[in-house]
Amino acid sequence: MLYVIQTALELGFMYALVAMALFLSYRVLDIADLTTDSGFVLGAAVSVTAAAAGHPFLAIPAAMAAGAGAGYVTAFLQTRLGVPSILAGIVTNTGLYTVNLMVMGWSSNVSLLKQETLFTMLRDTGIGGSWYKLILAAGITVLAAVFLVWFLGTRLGLSIRATGDNREMVSASSINPVFTISVGLCVSNALTALSGAVVGQYQKSADINSGTGIVVIGLACLIIGETVIGRRSVGRNVAAAVAGSIVYRFLYAVILKTAVVPIECLKLVTAIVVALAIASPALKEWGALEKRKIGSMQKGGRQNC
């Protein structure tokens, strides 16, 4: 049981980076960025390939730079060429499939057999004992969370938040929405690629299909966290992304252990949860409207009597 908890915490912290990325693109910029799936694989592919070449440390910033480049392509299509945000993400996501294959040497899977990774290097130091993976994963995620909170509090970060709130008003001021959207999507996709890079070295492999459904899982983590912690401030939102990811991984581990839901159906259940959570305001409004209708009918019936 301890091993299950430990693994859930490790994966929860690593995948929390995707939830933070979606918080920036979806909640702050109000953009549905569908580059996430292939961006995650891109980070893993660059990280594993660089680690296989003997550069596990360099692999992390290289993966983040590649992710930022993917985010810039999406932003360029959206802001300069007038492609709708969803279609821009789909186009980039599709193109990245070939790019990822190129990075992995035209192979669908790359493994790190007997190669050093960040995790094995920390293990060899003896720091943390059997919890060394959790220490590294938590450390990277906490640093990324602190950076994101700090960044969104800077002048540029506030401009990005203003762009997401009211793009037309921002356009009328001295803020350039093309620049703020580009920076926001670059940072968002860099975080997604960072998650893929860490997971790739953690699993010692990169697979071309490892990012399938990541955007839905990330949204589920974000929504779960916001339900538990709330979303009153940037710091609380970022903490919600991390907490939601950990809770989701715990639920995932429990389902695997108890087989309450067949593992093949887990992504379907996740998609339904995300759809219901996103549609909850409309569902609440519909419920309130139906309640008022029933109340009016009952009141009218009493008056007729």
Image (cartoon, rainbow, N blue to C red):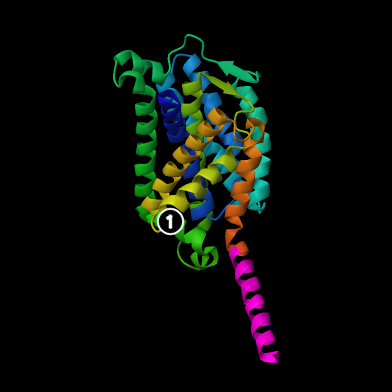
Residue sitting farthest toward the bottom: 304
Which residues make up the magenta segment? 284-305
Q: Is residue 80 visible?
A: no
Which residue is rendered at x = 46% and y = 48% of the image?
A: 225
Q: Residues within 10 Å of mark 1 (few under 14, many from 20)?
A: some
Q: Is residue 259 visible?
A: yes
Give coordinates of residue 215: x percent, y percent. Answer: 58, 41
Which SS does the magenta portion mostly show? helix
Residue 19 percent coordinates (x, y): 49, 43
Quarter of the image where the C terminus is located: bottom right
Q: Is residue 190 above or below residue 102?
A: below
Q: Residue at x 46, y 52 (%)?
A: 226
Q: Nearer the viewer, residue 265 or 198?
A: 265
* Residue depicted at x 43% and y 35%: 13
**Three-letter amino acid code at disc 1?**
Arg
Disc 1 target residue: 231
Q: Residue 144 occupies which quadrant of the picture?
A: top left
Q: Is residue 303 magenta?
A: yes
Coordinates of residue 198 in the picture (x, y in percent)? 46, 27
